[in-house]
Image (cartoon, rainbow, N blue to C red):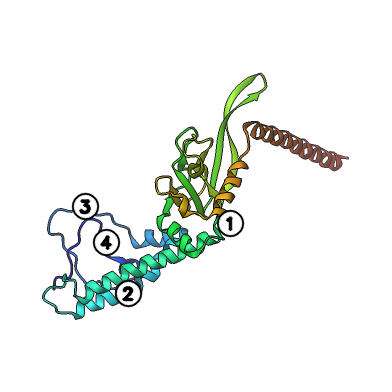
Amino acid sequence: MHLARLQPGAHFGELALLSEKGAKRAATVRAVRPSGLLRIEEAEYRRSAQLHNCMWIAIKPIYTNVVRELLATHLSTCSPNPLTPAHPAKRMYRRIVREGQLEALRETMQFVRSVGPFEHMPAEQLEQLCRVLRPVLVGAGEVLQRQGGAAQGMYIVRWGRLVEERNLLLQQGDRWEERDLRVRELTRRDVVGELALLAPERKLGTSLRAETPASCLFLSRSDFAPQLLHDHTMRELRMMAKRHPTDDELRSRHYQDLEWGRAKRAYVDEVVSEVRWARHA
């Protein structure tokens, strides 16, 4: 029995990732012409799902029960044309897509409402915002934006750790050298890149790099419209933009850290010397 014809962008084999090991396939997939596929093994998927827990939370409710129901409907239906809109499997597929989209939207809204600048947004406005937010997964060491480049948009960190850095000239004795100074670390619920929305013509004053694997929600400058954000949210973002340290403040912080590091090493050396002297006394 012919169940469906898979076009570019379609996927199959979800049960191999969600079922117990050794589960048998309920259908056969055959290539009718030379094709290219992307494949993920069960072991690699489960490792990634454990690392990126939000992926598992988002996918499992969508597929665990409804996909089984869809396959059962496929196998128990003997319609001569299973691709017609009225076919039960077709209706089930539309329900899967709808439920998946709504579940992902609800989860995104719940998270965004827990982020400081967005907690007072009306539900309708929050929904509009969450519909244009795009999930982004980045690997450790990946650069999301570079100093001096054009601002692309705003990021909300879901999990992982990002680092905002600024390249500055520093005096080291009688010479000057460039160094990347850490402006701040960003973890869950932190917001960065608000200047892309408030002053899109300005060049980026910092670089943004993932220190660990991370997941973010991204609002691009092209998708942004003032009506997406509540007045309170805009005020919060403007206040955040004003708290960015100046170059002189970063240099001062760097030199203070150096002095503090030298003082700690001197203190440790002194304690070690005293202990050694006491042992030999």
Q: Secondary structure at mark 1?
A: helix
Q: Closest to the observer: 244 or 120?
A: 120
Of the numbered discs 4 and 3, the one sitting upstream in the chain is: 4
Q: Which mark is residue 20?
A: none
Relative height, residue 99 to residue 157 (above, below):
below
- Residue at 55% x, 41% y is 164
Q: Could you tell me residue 38's position as x and y percent? A: 28, 54
Q: Secondary structure at mark 2?
A: helix
Relative height, residue 151 to residue 127 (above, below):
above
Q: Could you tell me residue 197's position as x and y percent? A: 48, 44
Residue linked to disc 4: 11
Residue linked to disc 2: 66
Q: Secondary structure at mark 4?
A: loop
- How many residues crowd around disc 1 within 10 Å: few (fewer than 14), some, or many (20 or more)? some
In this view, the mark in front (3 or 1): 1
Residue linked to disc 1: 116
Distance, label 2 to label 3, CA atoms, is 27 Å
Distance, label 4 to label 3, CA atoms, is 12 Å
